[in-house]
Image (tube, rainbow, N blue to C red):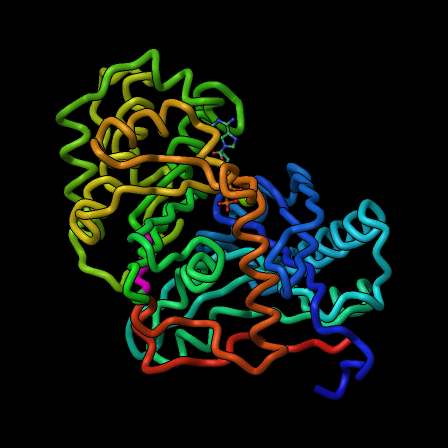
C-alpha cells in the first residue's frame, strides 16, 4: 500500500468502536502480532451528540445535513480518543500502521437487492486529524456481496478464543446481542440474537432518567410479565434462522410501547425486557450449539450481574464467564476486533466469514483514507 512506509512493522493498530448502545467510544491500542490489547480509552458521547445520533436512527427532517454534521462530530470524537490513547501509552503516531474505525450505525437494512448499512463517520476528517491511515466503512462490502454486513466479530473471536479442544460460544452484549459459535472442528458461525441492552437502556432512561440499569438492580425489583414476554417473543426476527442481523431499525422504544398494555408496572416491564434478552440468547445457543459448555461474555452487558445470572440459569451445564478471565476486558473486545479488521485490510486478507454473514464469498472489508 502506497501510504505505508516500508520500515513500518505492520503490527500496531488502533481500533475504534461506538456501538448501538450509544454510550460512547471505546478505543484500543492493539498489537496484531501478539493479538494483545496494550491500551484502552473510553470516551462518552456528549449528551447533545448522543441525542442527535439517536434521533438520526429514525427518519427526520433535513437528514443529509444533520448526518454530515454528526459524521464530523463522530470523527472529532474518534480523533480525540486516538490522541488520548497515544498519550496514555507513550506511542507515536508514526508507529501506528492504521486505525480501524467502525463509525456510528444509524441505519442497518442489509436485506434484498437495495440493502445497505450506514455508519456515520467522516473518514477523511479522521485521517486529517489523526495523521494515521484510516480504514472505515467496514460493513458495506459484505452487504454489497449479499451479506448481512454483521456480525463481523466472529472471525476475530475465532482468532483469540477459538480452540480445537472444544466448542466455544462467545456472546457480545452491546445494544444488540450477537453470538459467535467457534466449533472445535474449525467451523465458525455467528448471528445477532436480538436486543441485549438497547431496550433496557431506553426504558431505564424514561423511568429513572439514567443511561442504564446498573447491574440490573432495578430489573431485579420487578417480576417478569409472562403475557408481555410472549408478545415480545412473537417478533418474527427471533425465529428467523441465521444468517441474520438487526439493530435499532427494529428494536426501539416505539416497538416496545406498541406492545405494552395499561397497568403494567415499569419495573416489571424492565424485568421482562431483561428476560427477553436472556431467553433469546439462551434459546439461540441451545438451538445452534446445544453441546456448548463454555460461553464467553463481553460487551457492557457482561457487567449486568442480573443478566449474567439469568443466562447461567437458562443454560444449565454451560459455564458463563467474562472475557476478562481470558485476558481481554469486556469493553475492549469489539474495539480490538475492528483493529484486527484493519490489519486484515492492510494484509489484503478477507475480513468477513460468508458462513456467518451470508455473503457470496470472502471479501476485503473497508475503505482507506490515507494519512
Ligand atoms: N454496570 C453495568 N450494569 C448494567 N449494564 C451495564 C453496565 N455497564 C455497562 N452496561 C451496559 O452496557 C452498555 C454499553 O455496552 P457496549 O458494549 O459499549 O455496547 P455497544 O457496543 O452497543 O456500545 C450500556 O449501554 C449498558 O446498557
Ligand atoms: Mg459502546
State the extent of the magenta-drawn residues as a range.
188-192
x then y, percent, for residue 278: 28, 34
Q: How many marks?
A: 0
* Residue drawn at point x = 57 percent, y = 82 percent: 348
262 lies above or below 53: above
For the C terminus, the quadrant is: bottom right
**20 vs 320: above or below:** below
Q: Residue furthest bottom?
A: 2
Residue 262 covered by magenta stretch = no
**Residue 260 visible:** yes
Query: For the N terminus, which image quadrant?
Result: bottom right
In the depicted structure, whether residue 326 falls above or below residue 120: above
From the top left corner, tell me how far across and down residue 362 is, in percent.
40, 80
The answer to which of 220 and 354 lies nearer the viewer is 354
State the residue at coordinates (48%, 18%).
208
Q: Position of residue 161 (x, y in %)?
A: 44, 53
Q: Which residue is more in the foreground, 254 or 78?
A: 78
Left or right: 327 in relation to 244: right
- Can residue 190 be found in the magenta stretch? yes
The reply to whether residue 22 is visible in this rendering is: no
The image quarter in which residue 7 lies: bottom right
Q: Is residue 100 left or right of residue 223?
A: right
**Furthest residue to the front?**
165
368 displayed left or right of 292: right
Rendered location of residue 44, percent (x, y):
66, 39
User: What residue do we see at 32% from left, 29% from top?
Assistant: 274
Considering the whole magenta stretch, tell me its main secondary structure. strand
Q: Nearer the viewer, residue 227 or 134?
A: 134
Q: Quadrant of residue 353?
A: bottom left
Amino acid at each position: 500500500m502506497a501510504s505505508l512506509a516500508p520500515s513500518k512493522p505492520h503490527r500496531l493498530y488502533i481500533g475504534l468502536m461506538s456501538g448501538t448502545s450509544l454510550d460512547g467510544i471505546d478505543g484500543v491500542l492493539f498489537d496484531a502480532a501478539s493479538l494483545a490489547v496494550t491500551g484502552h480509552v473510553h470516551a462518552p458521547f456528549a449528551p447533545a451528540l448522543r441525542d442527535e445520533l439517536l434521533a438520526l436512527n429514525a427518519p427526520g427532517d433535513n437528514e443529509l445535513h444533520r448526518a454530515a454534521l454528526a459524521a464530523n462530530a463522530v470523527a472529532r470524537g474518534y480523533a480525540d480518543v486516538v490522541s488520548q490513547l497515544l498519550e496514555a501509552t507513550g506511542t507515536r503516531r508514526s508507529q501506528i500502521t492504521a486505525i480501524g474505525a467502525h463509525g456510528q450505525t444509524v441505519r442497518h437494512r442489509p436485506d434484498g437487492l437495495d440493502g445497505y448499512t450506514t455508519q456515520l463517520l467522516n473518514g477523511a476528517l479522521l485521517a486529517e486529524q489523526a495523521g494515521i491511515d484510516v480504514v472505515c466503512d467496514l460493513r458495506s462490502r459484505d452487504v454489497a456481496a449479499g451479506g448481512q454486513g454483521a456480525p463481523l466479530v466472529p472471525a476475530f473471536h475465532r482468532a483469540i478464543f477459538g480452540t480445537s479442544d472444544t466448542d466455544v460460544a462467545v456472546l457480545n452484549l452491546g445494544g444488540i446481542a450477537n453470538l459467535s459459535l467457534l466449533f472445535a472442528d474449525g467451523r465458525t458461525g455467528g448471528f445477532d440474537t436480538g436486543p441485549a441492552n438497547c431496550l433496557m437502556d431506553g426504558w431505564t432512561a424514561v423511568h429513572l432518567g439514567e443511561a442504564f440499569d446498573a447491574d440490573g438492580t432495578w430489573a431485579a425489583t420487578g417480576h417478569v410479565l409472562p403475557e408481555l414476554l410472549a408478545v415480545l417473543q412473537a417478533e418474527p426476527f427471533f425465529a428467523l434462522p441465521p444468517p441474520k442481523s438487526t439493530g435499532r431499525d427494529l428494536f426501539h422504544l416505539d416497538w416496545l410501547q406498541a406492545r405494552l398494555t395499561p397497568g403494567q408496572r415499569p419495573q416489571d416491564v424492565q424485568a421482562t425486557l431483561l428476560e427477553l434478552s436472556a431467553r433469546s440468547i439462551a434459546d439461540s445457543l441451545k438451538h445452534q450449539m446445544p453441546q456448548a459448555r463454555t460461553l464467553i461474555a463481553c460487551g457492557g452487558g457482561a457487567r449486568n450481574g442480573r443478566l449474567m445470572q439469568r443466562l447461567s440459569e437458562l443454560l444449565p451445564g454451560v459455564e458463563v464467564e467474562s472475557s476478562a478471565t481470558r485476558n481481554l476486558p469486556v469493553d475492549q473486545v469489539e474495539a480490538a476486533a475492528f483493529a484486527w479488521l484493519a490489519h486484515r485490510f492492510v494484509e489484503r486478507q478477507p475480513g468477513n466469514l460468508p458462513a456467518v454473514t451470508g455473503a457470496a464469498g470472502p471479501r476485503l472489508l473497508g475503505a482507506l483514507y490515507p494519512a
